[in-house]
């Protein structure tokens, strides 16, 4: 039975294009959110280029998912004078990425440990929830940060980046790097009394690390 | 055995194999990059490197870099908001010139059609110059703040470096962590950990 299964798997693997599956961690693209996300995807090769489809999922945001920077900004802005202050926080709860990558012409992985790098370009489409973090002196424990939800947007944006690959034996590897990515969203407005009318690209670097399995090699 | 070697011997795996490439000699690199973890400033850098590779998986490098001070153009929107609208003074300093010596171990390598890719880890030490942004500190003319406006610090450098080589030409992508301790406004000791992302062209001399 196991022999038949192995034979069937071998036939499927021969018929399909090379396929790798990956799962791991990816950080937020903004400095104001620290909550990590799960990123999982699949990659194949077409004409010397890699094509990756990935999904990012992040658990709902509360004030514990805000970066220390956000708490600090809210607190120190309250110490100043002048206009009142709110910190815009755009929270990516789910996203889909389509990326094309180039590994500089890698022919095949040598046996044993190997590694190299690749560059990425592509786009992402995500569900982005708009929040504002504001000072609240009535909070008795923890940072005096109150989080107000403004709305939810479906947004699109570019992705570029680079990654390093480390293959332990040709079948299992690590893939880690950084993606500069973002979304076209409402421009940041720090004054609660001023309405937001403009849109702009909000983008930043997010680091990621994946465990990768090469199904073809298996 | 490959798994044991992979898990336990990542750092020294390159030394266990045979020679992996013909890269011996001096290499000159010219590149640019940016600081990716500063929420208050947009900082860009240019960088020159000269390295020698006594073995294919061992690199000793001299690095010299410069980050121009673009004044208030360096400020991000949140910085302008805090300073100009909320009248709060964040402790902002900018590094300018830096240089150091690093060693790199290249344990990972893959052949490509006309060359190879590699991946290594680097460590090193150096010096870095910093300048406090007195406009952001709202301390122009303040003698206490001016006393530590310009400083030079010992810094440590570590990171990950990937290279793609074709003949004597290489593309180098580096992620470096530059750490140092400085005094801001004469009163505040701050530990800086700048993450530098660089892209460079490297040529075998």
Image: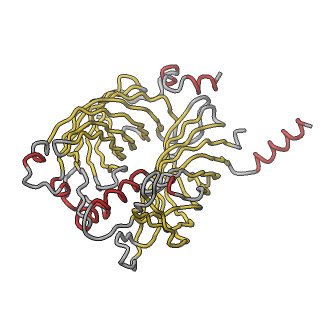
Residue ID at (44%, 67%): A132
Nearest the camera: B52 or B196? B196
Residue A142: x and y in percent read: 46, 51
Up-down: is B176 above or below A156? above
Nearest the camera: B94 or A179? B94
Residue B189: x and y in percent read: 24, 39
Q: How many marks?
A: 0
Residue ID at (33%, 43%): B194
Does residue A94 appear left or right of residue B161 in this picture?
A: right
Residue A98: x and y in percent read: 57, 60
In the picture, residue A188 is in which quadrant?
Answer: bottom left
Q: Quadrant of the N terminus of chain A?
A: top right
In the picture, residue B174 is in which quadrant?
Answer: top left
Does residue B141 appear left or right of residue A38 in this picture?
A: left
In the picture, residue A217 is in which quadrant?
Answer: top right
Residue A53 appearing in the image: no
Does residue B125 appear left or right of residue A116 in this picture?
A: left
Residue A165 appearing in the image: yes
Up-down: is B104 above or below A88? above
Up-down: is B128 above or below A148? above
Q: Quadrant of the C terminus of chain A?
A: top right
Up-down: is A161 above or below B175? below
Residue ID at (23%, 32%): B154
């Amino acid at each position: 039975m196991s022999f038949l299964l192995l034979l069937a798997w071998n036939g499927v693997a021969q018929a399909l294009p090379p396929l790798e599956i990956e799962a791991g961690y990816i950080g937020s693209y903004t400095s104001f959110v620290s909550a990590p996300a799960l990123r999982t995807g699949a990659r194949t090769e077409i004409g010397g280029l890699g094509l990756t489809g990935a999904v990012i999922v992040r658990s709902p945001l509360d004030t514990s998912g805000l970066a220390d920077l956000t708490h600090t900004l809210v607190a120190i802005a309250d110490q100043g004078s002048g206009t009142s202050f709110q910190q815009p926080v755009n929270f990516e709860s789910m996203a889909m990425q389509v990326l094309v990558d180039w590994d500089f012409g890698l022919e095949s992985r040598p046996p044993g440990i190997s590694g190299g790098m690749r560059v990425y370009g592509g786009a992402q489409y995500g569900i982005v929830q708009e929040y504002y973090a504001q000072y609240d002196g009535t909070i008795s424990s923890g940072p005096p940060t109150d989080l107000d939800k403004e709305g939810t947007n479906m947004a699109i944006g570019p992705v570029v980046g680079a990654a390093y690959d480390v293959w332990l034996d040709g079948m299992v590897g690590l893939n880690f790097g950084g993606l500069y990515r973002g979304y076209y969203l409402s421009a940041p407005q720090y004054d609660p009394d001023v309405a937001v009318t403009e849109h702009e690209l909000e983008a930043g670097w997010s680091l990621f690390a994946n465990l990768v399995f090469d199904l073809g090699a298996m | 055995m490959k798994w044991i070697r992979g898990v336990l011997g990542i750092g020294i795996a390159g030394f266990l194999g045979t020679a992996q490439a013909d890269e011996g000699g001096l290499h000159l690199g010219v590149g640019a990059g940016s600081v990716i973890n500063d929420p208050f400033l947009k900082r860009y850098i240019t960088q020159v490197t000269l390295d020698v590779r006594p073995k294919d998986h061992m690199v000793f490098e001299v690095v010299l870099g410069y980050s121009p001070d673009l004044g208030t153009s360096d400020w991000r929107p949140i910085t302008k908001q805090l300073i100009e609208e909320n009248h709060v003074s964040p402790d902002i300093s900018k590094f300018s010139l830096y240089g150091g010596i690093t060693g790199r171990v290249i344990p990972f390598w893959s052949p490509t059609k006309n060359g190879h890719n590699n991946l290594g880890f680097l460590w090193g030490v150096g010096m870095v110059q910093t300048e406090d942004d007195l406009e952001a500190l709202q301390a122009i003319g303040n003698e206490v703040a001016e006393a530590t406006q310009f400083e030079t610090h010992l810094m440590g450098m570590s990171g990950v470096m990937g290279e793609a080589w074709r003949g004597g030409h290489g593309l180098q992508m580096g992620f470096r962590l530059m750490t140092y301790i400085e005094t801001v406004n004469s009163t505040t000791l701050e530990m800086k950990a700048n993450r530098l992302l660089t892209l460079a062209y490297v040529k075998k001399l």
